[in-house]
Amino acid sequence: MHLATPDESFDLPIASGVLRAHRFGPADGRLVLCVPGLSANSRSFDYLATELAAAGQKVVAVDLRGRGLSSISGPGSYGWNNHAKDVLDAATALGAERFSLVGHSMGAFIGMATARRAPQRIRRLALIDAAGRPEAAAVQPILTAVQRLGSVYPDVEQYLARVRSIGTVPWDEVWERHYRYDLVAVPGGVRSRTDRAAVFEDMAYGALQNPPDLWASLAMRTLLLRAAVPLGAGFIVSGEDRDRFLATVTGGAAVDVDANHYGIITHPATATALRSFLA
């Protein structure tokens, strides 16, 4: 697997704070904005960004507020709609009136919320393994993964061993880079920079939503990339939801990828589908 380092890393001042961003590819290319999942950060896109940049795209991946090196804001400031406003503000700060958006997991829900707020600004929308309500059996591994937040680990290697022991992330260079990026030294060892309260607020928000309500807002071409390997004992996107999505979204298309919810973001089939879709 070839991974580039970002061509540029920088802070984006927006109305709600500051988002840390990483650019891959030409500075003057057509913008593809990448939005990570619930407790993930921008570096989860390093593989896909490398592949899309090689095809001439200007790819910018961001840390959502409360994650990575972005601002941590107060209670009540999170939720898909607030993140969607951040995405639009980030695109404006990058000089893009129209742009394509690639969202993974919760980032896909944020992508759909962004499309509802400003459909005229979204050229193309790619949803990586999120569309409707996840199956209950698939949620438990995600809940297990977020329990790491807020805890102090003696050193980096013990933190990484804890993440690997969960067994849901197909460990490779991308994921190791992603988890190392998120660590900060504190008294007694290291901990994740990602704010536990922010993640749990977004989880509580998501539990009250019905994602298919957003499908009617998707007037742009939209690609759903579905993980065809279950996460735990269930799917984040069921086959039934994939089919309902295609029947509802006029410009929708779907590709099943032979990976689980985490492995899909580093799978060559995902990169191939996105290169074609965003061309």
Image: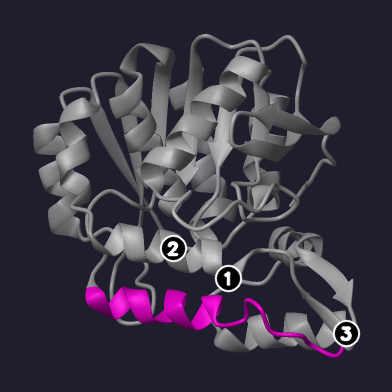
Residue 143 placement (x, y as % from top left): 44, 78
Amino acid tagged 3: Gly
Residue at the spot 57% in from the left edge and 72% down from the top edge:
169
In front: 227, or 123? 123
Upstream in sequence: badge 3 or badge 1: 3
Amino acid tagged 1: Arg
Amino acid tagged 2: Glu
Whole-number angstrom distance, CA of label 2 to CA of label 3? 26 Å
Q: How is the image coloured?
A: one colour
Residue 18 appears in view: yes
Q: Are marks 3 and 1 in contact (CB under 8 Å)?
A: no
- Residue 69 relative to residue 52: left or right: right
Upstream in sequence: badge 2 or badge 3: 3
Q: Please report the bounds of the magenta region as a residue range.
A: 136-154
Q: Is residue 193 above or below residue 60?
A: below
- Number of numbered labels in the structure image: 3
Residue 68 placement (x, y as % from top left): 71, 55
Tag of residue 201: 2
Helix, strand or loop at mark 3: strand
- Residue 71 relative to residue 116: left or right: right
Badge 1 is on which residue? 196
- Residue 188 relative to residue 14: left or right: right
Residue 273 appears in view: no
Badge 3 is on which residue? 189
Residue at the spot 53% in from the left edge and 78% down from the top edge:
145
Residue 129 placement (x, y as % from top left): 38, 53
Residue at the spot 18% in from the left edge and 57% down from the top edge:
239
